[in-house]
Image (spheres, rainbow, N blue to C red):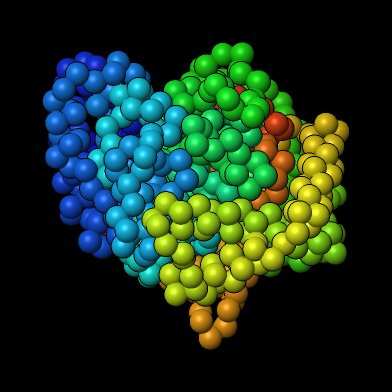
Amino acid sequence: MQEIYKLDATAQAELVRKGDVSPLELVNAAIDRIEKLNPKINAVIHTHFERAREQAKALLPEGPFKGVPFLLKDLGCGNLKGDPIYWGTQFLKDADFRSPFTAYIVEKFIAAGLIVVGRTNVPELGAWTTTEPESYGPSRNPWNLNHSTGGSSGGSAAAVAAQMVPMAHASDGGGSIRNPASQCGVVGLKPTRGRISLGPYIGESWAGMVFEFAETRTIRDAATLLDCVSGFMPGDPYTAVPPSRLYREEVGIDPGKLRIGVLKENPGTDIKAPCVEAVESVAKVLDGLGHVVEFSRPKVMESPEAKEELEIHLINIIAAYQAHVIDQFSQLIGREIGSEDMDCDNWAVTELGRSLTANQYIDAVDMLHRFNRQMAGWWDGGFDLLITPTIPEPPPPLGELVPDRNEPLKGFMRSGLLVPFLIPFNMTGQPAISLPLCQTEDGLPIGIQLVAAFGREDLLFRIASQLEVEMPWADRNPQL
């Protein structure tokens, strides 16, 4: 039992099916690990230990992850009726806000047999590429406690990297699954738009740029979990075409000879040398596997002027939704939320959202649609995959990306420097995965992102499992 935490969720569930361990033993092992490591890492902010123990002793659903401990993110669709959910804010924490409903994805996590043992730390309103909220303090990277975990799913990624649980809920609005996966050295899949329902409360968010899923340690866990939580739910505004077979059946399948574009430089983006070298090393492995590898990228990603216009429209969409969310929270807690209730950058974004006109918002959405068609043409032109650094630098030190009241929006803009290869695929809705394939000389993780055409998670699982064999990461763990 002392070694159980080293196993992925699939292996832990197999032990339960064989009767070698009980769900209660798995839950107790996770609780012991959290109690031991969380004071150092600050990944878990709410615990449900006694409830989890009671559930582990009761009759559990016969899902593929029966008895496996799990963590929910304190944001987005991490809603479990009656549980606290604070979105990293002090105002919801002070109000002890409780979720009035359970999200569909959480219902499906539970139906898969997972047992929720707690909830993970997030940045305020999920707005940063680091997890350092004033309300709960910073989450720390298990590989180096002085560095960021990424955000907004930084608590979840840190908990999985530290082997507190084998996988944890995550969500992605501008890279918030893949960025923490890269910084913490775990697997982070952002599925296709419409693959996973955001219901019952949300139809879409950020004009379709928000996605839900998880951080995992292995490809087979990601594939099996996606089988469990994907699919249309009544009232969804759209859905992705279902796969021809289960995603877990794609793991280990020969992907065939693929045409793969590799991005190792990009106008206007400062890609640090370790990340360039990491991309080159993966490209070399893929070439050795017989794939056709070319240094190519969609042309729409090349123009600095187009990027600047794009950023303005993106910020308008995000700001409009944030202003709407703050108004909703004001109604829910029964008082107006003001500048004193949030960090200076989040307040500036909220105020921007309140100042926008309907025409400005529709202009931004129209831009989004034009960009999507331009991007899709590259894949339609014969490429199967695009390979990029997940983020253009290794995990930054803590404190670099947080808001500074003396320099409003400095933290917001610094956060934006980490997402140039992430948010484009929130815009297009394509599936993208970050794999923990490389490290810096001093042992910090460097993730590599693989992007497939719309709806092609099957291809991502095939090539990712091929790389998992060629460039294994299972035995590479932080020494806490």
The quadrant of the picture occupied by the N terminus is top left
Furthest residue to the bottom?
A: 406
Residue 262 located left or right of residue 166: right
Question: Does residue 460 show up?
Answer: no
| Residue at the image position 54 percent from the left and 38 percent from the top | 202
| Residue at the image position 58 percent from the left and 25 percent from the top | 235
Residue 109 located left or right of residue 177: left
Q: 7 or 75, which lies in front?
A: 75
Q: 49 or 206, which lies in front?
A: 206
| Residue at the image position 65 percent from the left and 51 percent from the top | 423
**Residue 146, picture quadrant:** bottom left
How many marks overall?
0
**Residue 431, picture quadrant:** top right
x and y percentages locating residue 361 in the rendered image? 75, 53
x and y percentages locating residue 136 in the rendered image? 33, 64
Q: Is residue 477 above or below residue 113?
A: below
Furthest residue to the top?
A: 244
The quadrant of the picture occupied by the C terminus is bottom left
Q: Is residue 100 above or below residue 314?
A: above
Q: Is residue 302 above or below residue 429?
A: below
Question: Does residue 352 show up?
Answer: yes
